[in-house]
Image (tube, rainbow, N blue to C red):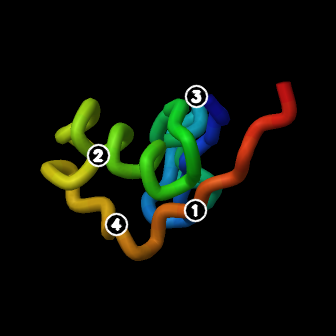
Amino acid sequence: MKEFIFYTFEGYTESPTGKVLENLQILGFEKGKNENEAFTALINNNQWIIKSGFNKDKIISKQLAI
């Protein structure tokens, strides 16, 4: 099984001083035979991603070298 990290440019975070910062949002890590299988697992196991308004088409993945 291959492991992937999934992230997006959507959203932002807030610094401890209250300043809004644009950054990447890590959505999760999943394993699968390939990227598509891992992505399906990510969405199935983390329904909050879609419920929170993240666009599935804007989620980026990279295979981790382990």
**Residue pictured at 23% horizontal, 39% vertical:** 44
Measured in 3D between alpha carbons, the distance from the residue under mark 4 to the one under mark 2, in whole angstroms, is 9 Å
Q: Amino acid at mark 1?
A: Ile
Identify the disc placed on residue 16.
3
Tell me, for residue 43, which label it has, or none: 2
From the top left corner, tell me how far across and down residue 4 is, in percent: 63, 40
Label 2 or label 1, whichever comes before in sequence order: 2
Disc nearer the start of the sequence (3/4): 3
Examine the rendering and report whether any part of residue 51 can be seen: yes
Instruction: Give the residue displayed 85% in from the left and 34% down from the top.
Output: 65
Q: Which of the two labelled residues, at mark 4 and mark 2, occupies the earlier sequence position?
A: 2
Please, is residue 55 above or below residue 63 in the view? below
Q: Nearer the viewer, mark 3 or mark 2?
A: 2
Marks 4 and 2 in Cβ contact (< 8 Å): yes
Please determine whether, in this image, residue 9 is positioned above or below residue 43.
below
Query: Which amino acid is tagged 2?
Result: Ile
